[in-house]
Image: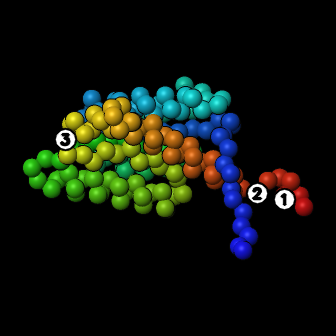
Amino acid sequence: MAIHQTIEPEPIHAPIRIGVIVSRYNPEVTESLREAAVESFATRPGADPEDELVVMPAPGAYEVPAIAYAAIETESFDGLVALACVIKGETRHDEVIAGAVVQGLTSLTVEFGMPIGLGVLTVDSLEQARARAGGEHGNKGAEAMNAVLGVLATVVAMEPSEAAEAE
């Protein structure tokens, strides 16, 4: 029988600073994602959204990784949430944009160790986007925020406790 430890993260009650990057393209969808992300953060015990959340606009989805990089460079954030909506058109443009965005955000997470919640919708239609921005499929903005908060809680739980370091 294998012996192992399981990390049980608990919600972080200490102040944390989260940057929320919101694409201005498809604003009907991205504003709903933003509202849900902010609301999800605000339910965190001890949260102070006015001091701990910074919402940053991006012209479109493609620009989100550049703004994420700039935010990381400020060393002001514990985590980021990326919100955008890429809707399929007549060409493969959506695939190119979505792939570049995800690759860019993943590279930043790996290079800098910054958790980035992925709330980038890649859908075939506006109806599908609405369904994922507060409709029948929930809200991916809230899910992205919860993912970042979950990663941060796990990272904190992995840190050695002061009692363990004293031994």
At horizontal 54% and vertical 25% (from top left) the residue drawn is 50
Dot 3: element: loop
Of residues 150 and 72, the one nearer the viewer is 150
Q: Dot 1, crowdedness within 10 Å: few (<14), some or many (≥20)?
A: few
The residue under label 1 is: 165
Q: Which quadrant of the structure image shows residue 10?
A: top right
Above or below for 7 versus 71: below
Dot 1: element: helix
Q: Residue furthest left?
A: 90
Residue 18 lies, in percent from the top left, at 53, 39
Name the mark nearer the viewer: 3 or 2.
Answer: 3
Circle 3: residue type: Ser
The residue under label 3 is: 125
Q: Left or right: where does residue 64 sit relative to residue 80? A: left
Above or below for 51 versus 18: above
Circle 1: residue type: Glu
Q: Left or right: where does residue 39 sit relative to residue 154? A: left
The residue under label 2 is: 160
First in sequence: mark 3 vs mark 2: 3
Q: Residue furthest bottom?
A: 1
- Quarter of the rendering occupied by the C terminus: bottom right
- Quarter of the rendering occupied by the N terminus: bottom right
At horizontal 76% and vertical 57% (from top left) the residue drawn is 160
Q: Is residue 161 visible?
A: yes
Of residues 77 and 75, the one nearer the viewer is 77
Q: Are marks 1 and 2 in contact (CB under 8 Å)?
A: yes
